[in-house]
Image (cartoon, grey):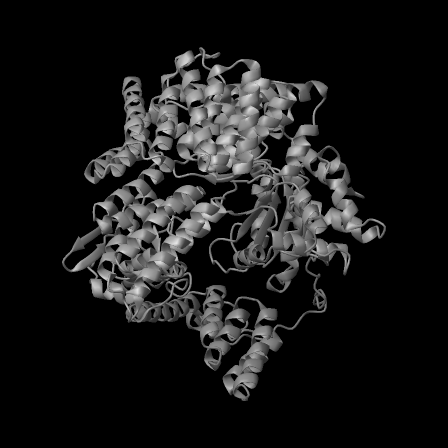
Amino acid sequence: MDSPRYGILGPLRLSHVQGQPLKAAKPRQLLATLLLHPNRFVSTDLIADALWESTPPRSATANIRTYVRALRGVLQDAGLSAPIDTSAAGYSIEVGVDELDASLFESLLAEGGHLKDAGDGRQAMQVLSRAYTLWRGRPLEDLTIPAAWEGSINRLEAQHRGLVDNLLDLRLEYGDAGGAAVLLSARLTDDPYDEQLWRRLVDALLAAGRVGEARAAYGKAVQTLADELDIKPGPELEAAGARAENGRSANWPNPGIPAARLGQSKEAERPRAEVVPGPMAAPELTDPLRPPSQLPLDLPDFSGREDHLDQLRDLVCGRDPVRPPIAVVSGAPGTGKTSLAVRLGHLVRESFPDGQIYLDMHGATQPRDPAAALTDLLLSLNLPDYAIPTDPERRSAMLRSELASRRVLIILDDVATAGQVTPLMPGTGASAVVVTSRNRLADLAGADSLALDTFDDGEAAALLESVAGAGRVDRTTSAAEEILAACGNLPLAIRIVGSRLAQRPDLSPGELARRLRDESSRLDELSIGELAVRTSADLSYDALSPDEARLYRLIGHFAVGVFSARALEAMASPASVRRSLDRLIEVNLVRISSVDHRGTARYRMHDLLRLHAIGVGDEGQQAEAVKDVATVVDAILNKIRRANKALAVEYFGVLEHTGPLTSPDPAPFTETDAIAWFDSERSTFVPAIRAAAQNGLHEYAWRIAAAWGPYLDMRAGFDDWGESHRAGLRSAIECGDRWGEAIMHRNLGQLGIYQDDWDAASQHLDQAATIFAEVGDRLGDGISAVGLGTWLRERGRPDEGLAQYEKAIEAFMEVGNANGEAVARTAASSVWLSRDDTVIAGRYLAEAFLLGVRLADAHRVAKVRRRIAELRLHQGRQDQAVRQLRTSLETFTNLGDDHCAAYARADLGHALMERGELAAARKMLLDSMEIGRRLGDRSVEGQAAQHLGRLYLKTGNLDWARRTFDRAARVWQQAGHDARATACRRELAAFENDAAAV
């Protein structure tokens, strides 16, 4: 069953949501307050107390309304259907019982209580165990806990304590001593001085067969009582300690079975006559055969995987009376599956007194026959070879019979398929099996899966230091960081480089890092003795079918980052590609990187496996891989072109392709479909550009970068814009395409303007203008001129900027590009407005507006309306300005253009302020500042902040005015607008001087 959508039993959590959509403190505090009182109206006063304790601001009610609106928007955007209702009584959030963990928790408590009262203790234990899993920590522990919440939180914590007590009694009653030990350990964290809890923990561990842990628990109890209370253990705890020392539970000789459930038959109670052995009787066996102890040597420098070890220990040491625990540890080559399983075996040896068996199944080379493996297991259990049946099925049945009465740990290493080990599984009893495999073995019945990934940064650094030896490498140095990055945090690779450093005192970390930089020889460096990353990867590759191997090689050449399955479908039929991809995922050569809210998955190949995939195969197969990459990037480019044709917004820029499509269009895009496709595949394009360049397909690289320019401009995707176009520029230069070079320079120059990177903008725009003139592209001339004009205007040289705009108008009229002409006329009007010449500015804007209407380009018309609103403000006609800006903002919002919408909000906030609608103006300006900050556009953020500072001056709120003007000045300064920053400070200083004079 899916986890609840909302979680308050621990840190506040929104499940089934990518990322962290709710970051602001006050909306989080508001949501938590409503979830503590689900489906009930919470008064404004109580919400104010929760948000501001005893000092709510005078505007608390208005602020709460703002937070409610923001919260509704966040929940709606995240796809969470939890309506927040408003009434005179306050606010209420409507959630079902299974949507909120606290509601589900209380429902399960009630259900478990009813079952227990009805005498169905086993079912009650299952229901209450499910309730226990919902508890993740103290309710809302990541938030500030106000007094208004204390009653609700205390109630939940009291219910949790009652749950633990009831569940503890049930687990002990029904023989789940291991589960009872988990609960007792948790209780002792809160109450470490309760001797009865310590006594029960010791006995529970003994009953679970965990003698070593029982002794350790008793020792910790003695130390805790002595250190903190200066007392010795009481008689009951001392008796438990004695039992631990002797290795006998309180219910010996039946450990794990509570005395209350032990039945004594009358036959057992009857005294038996002593049996005297006859003269021919066999001697009594006084030295029984030793139990098997076959675990390989544990690595002395094993590190990391603490969470995985805890999960596996809890699983294999659990005492399920019906199902023996079976764990499958899977992962890519080199992730340390065997090391983890062996370390686990050594940690839990005392829990398996009847032996530990290790069997290498050779799944990656020559898989061991299950029948032979059955024989090995039975011999390990000390059965004579003559007693082992010849029929494999009878051997499997005999193994199950033997394991049913023993407690044995079996490690089956390097398993190929589920079928290889299914006959080796126990049927019942207390034995446990740990399977390691490069495959996920999803079809192994009754198994719990644990997938290993690479180490996190901390684990990787710790392993490198441990293997290399004391003082050999410092994790904080750049050399260590570079080494770990080259290893991709893969445990096998880290162990190899650590061993090389340990055995080669003449090899410095800096020199090793230098050697690993070269991708073409990196795998050669990652080998020592019989350890080699390439050899490990070869074993997995050799097991692939021809189609799977071909896709593996393609992904190696193509997947420089994340990729989607759809991107690869051009190389073969979609069904064939997906079958092969499923197999690569199954054998852990490809892993799932993420799944978005639409269910679309993104995949990733580890960087060392990518290098392996590039190098495998003969010359013909490697050439085939490059050809497959060309097929894939060609399909991506043509699909971008098809999607561009469906966009309603006409792009202001030079498209790399304007003619007919070079491939058929099986299903034309609608505009909605095109935008949705761009959104879903956005993470594919930059890696595709890098892949094209790395495979020498430079024309594809720059053309893909240029082709998705319209989408990047509409979505303000500045990070992707910069990364893709810098790579595209290098490829255009590499393949000698001057026109492509000019397009890349112009687009990078426009990005520089958007991001207030004035030096970069100037350099790129100058280059673009020079090259467009060189190749005779008049459209490119005009577009570059508009960019240069804007740069000159923003840098305080409006006359030169106007000359560039006029030059652009001439070029656009020459080539008949009405969209470009409308852009240039709109831009020129801003210069005339700065001169307060509203007549000429109005003439330019009227012509631009008419061009936009004739083009039926709603986006262009909306941008012209922004300038018309500016004109109306110059003329003192605020009402008309507001009407124009509201229409403009609605258009940008409907088209999903957050960037233009941010400017429209800033302008609308200014216009509303001029009209006296201060509350609405403040909301618009705050929204504009936030969007500008998020997009990294400091100009719109500074503009909105400056207007907001003026609004605070109007209302006499000098403190907020200072803060906001200071923010505006800092933002303008960061944007390179020193004059505007100075103007902000002067405006505030002038007001303060006037106020002081009064």
Q: Residue at x 40, y 70 (%)?
A: 169
Please determine whether, in this image, residue 796 is positioned above or below residue 803: below
For the residue pair 261 and 367, the one nearer the viewer reads as: 367
Q: How far across and how far down the image is residue 75, in percent?
A: 31, 47
Q: Is residue 22 left or right of residue 709?
A: left
For the residue pair 917 and 643, the one nearer the viewer reads as: 917
Pick out the residue farthest to the bottom.
231
Please determine whether, in this image, residue 981 is positioned above or below residue 347: above
Q: Is residue 54 left or right of residue 879?
A: right
Q: Is residue 518 left or right of residue 503?
A: left
For the residue pair 280 and 554, the one nearer the viewer reads as: 554
Pick out the residue farthest to the right.
506
Tally of numbered tags: 0
Q: How far across and how far down the image is residue 341, in percent?
A: 63, 52
Q: Residue at x 49, y 24 (%)?
A: 784
Query: Looking at the image, can residue 93 be seen?
Result: yes
Pick out the residue farthest to the left.
88
Please determine whether, in this image, residue 723 is positioned above or below residue 499: above
Q: Which image quadrant is residue 242 in?
A: bottom right
Q: How far across and how far down the image is residue 911, in percent?
A: 26, 42
Query: Looking at the image, can residue 104 be seen?
Result: no
* On-image quarter of the C terminus: bottom left
Q: Residue at x 56, y 39 (%)?
A: 418
Q: How far across and how far down the image is residue 524, in percent?
A: 77, 37
